[in-house]
Image: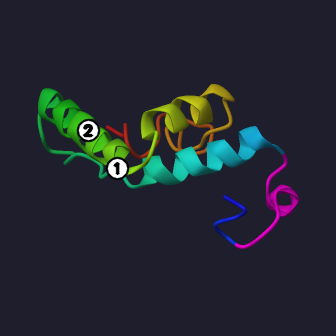
Amino acid sequence: MAAELDGRPSALYWHFASKQALLTALADQVLAEVAPPPARARWDRRLERLAVGLRSTLLVVIDGAELISVGQAGGQSTAVTGGGGPPGRIFRT
């Protein structure tokens, strides 16, 4: 990533405390691209739309599914929880 930005790898850690924090931020950014399903739709249609949206988004990102799983593994993500509270934007009821 640093090479793509014409920077040095150590410069990334000015903005991120660790590699896990960087991967978590990337995973959150990818998950933010998933459009929330319509709130008025039935639960099964909402789940289907969410799954299709997530799959479509992950297919655009190289190793997208792996990035999300690694990013979520650290337990620091805010994409799903909406910042540590109840379920966030992609699962809001």
- Marks 1,2: beta carbons within 8 A: yes
Q: Which residues are magenta?
A: 6-17
Residue 84: name its quadrant: top right
Q: How many marks?
A: 2
Q: Is residue 9 above or below residue 31?
A: below
Q: Residue at x 19, y 48 (%)?
A: 38
2 sits left or right of 25 in the view: right
Residue 88, which numbered label?
none
Q: Residue at x 26, y 38 (%)?
A: 50
> Residue 64 at x, y = what percent?
44, 41
Helix, strand or loop for disc 2: helix
68 sits left or right of 59 in the view: right
Residue 34, which numbered label?
1
> Residue 8 at x, y = what percent?
82, 64
Q: Residue at x 18, y 29 (%)?
A: 43
Residue situated in front as seen by the camera: 61 or 92: 61
Q: CA distance from mark 1 to mark 2?
A: 8 Å
Q: Amino acid at mark 2?
A: Leu
> Residue 73 at x, y = what percent?
63, 26
Q: Earlier in the sequence, mark 1 or mark 2?
A: 1
Quadrant that contains the N terminus: bottom right
Q: Residue at x 58, y 50 (%)?
A: 26
Helix, strand or loop for disc 1: loop
Q: Amino acid at mark 1?
A: Val
> Residue 52 at x, y = what percent?
21, 38
Q: Which residue is mark 2?
A: 50
Q: Is residue 35 above or below residue 59?
A: below
Residue 64 among magenta residues: no
